[in-house]
Amino acid sequence: MVKITFIDATGVARTADGEVGSTVMETAINNAVPGIEAECGGACACSTCHVYIDPAWQEKVGGPSPMEEDMLDFAYGIQPNSRLSCQIKVTKDLDGLVVRTPERQA
Ligand code: FES
C-alpha cells in the first residue's frame, strides 16, 4: 500500500492507503476523503478531482498531459502545481505523496 496524504483547504490532513495501479482520485473516493468529487468517474472529463501537488512531490508526479491541461482550464483556482487526481497513477514511488484539495471543485 502507498500512503497518500490529502490536506484540505482548512489544513486538515487525512492519510489514506492507495493501491498500486489505482489512481490518487480513486484512493480519495475509496477512503471517503472529502474535497474530491470526481463526477466523471476518472475519464478526465469533469475537473472535479482537482488537487494541488505538494511542491516537494511535483517533480516525481510530473505534469499534466495536453488533454488534462485542457480540462484543468475548467477547474476552480488552478495553480502551477494543479493536477487532476484521476490522471495520477499510484506507484510505489509515490509512497508518502502529499496533495492539497482546493477550497471547492469547479
Ligand atoms: Fe473527472 Fe478526474 S474525475 S476529470
Image (tube, rainbow, N blue to C red):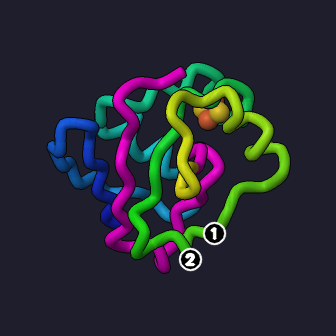
Would residue 27 appear left or right of 63 to someone viewing this image? Answer: left
Check contact, mark 2 vs mark 1: CB within 8 A. yes
Q: Residue at x 83, y 44 (%)?
A: 67
Would residue 67 appear left or right of 89 to someone viewing this image? Answer: right
Mark 1 burial class by Cα count in 10 Å: few <14, some 14-19, many 20+: few
Per the image, is 36 magenta? no
Magenta segment boundaries in residue numbering: 83-106
Q: Residue at x 39, y 63 (%)?
A: 54
Element at badge 1?
loop
Q: Residue at x 40, y 24 (%)?
A: 104
Q: Which residue is mark 1?
A: 62
- Location of ligand 1 given as a quarter of the image: top right
Distance (Cα) linking label 2 and label 1: 5 Å
Mark identifier at residue 85: none
Above or below residue 103? Residue 63 is below
Above or below residue 15? Residue 62 is below
Q: Nearer the viewer, residue 40 or 10?
A: 10
- Specify whether residue 1 is in view: no
Q: Residue 66 in the image: x percent, y percent?
A: 84, 51
Q: Which residue is mark 2?
A: 59
Residue 69 placement: quadrant: top right
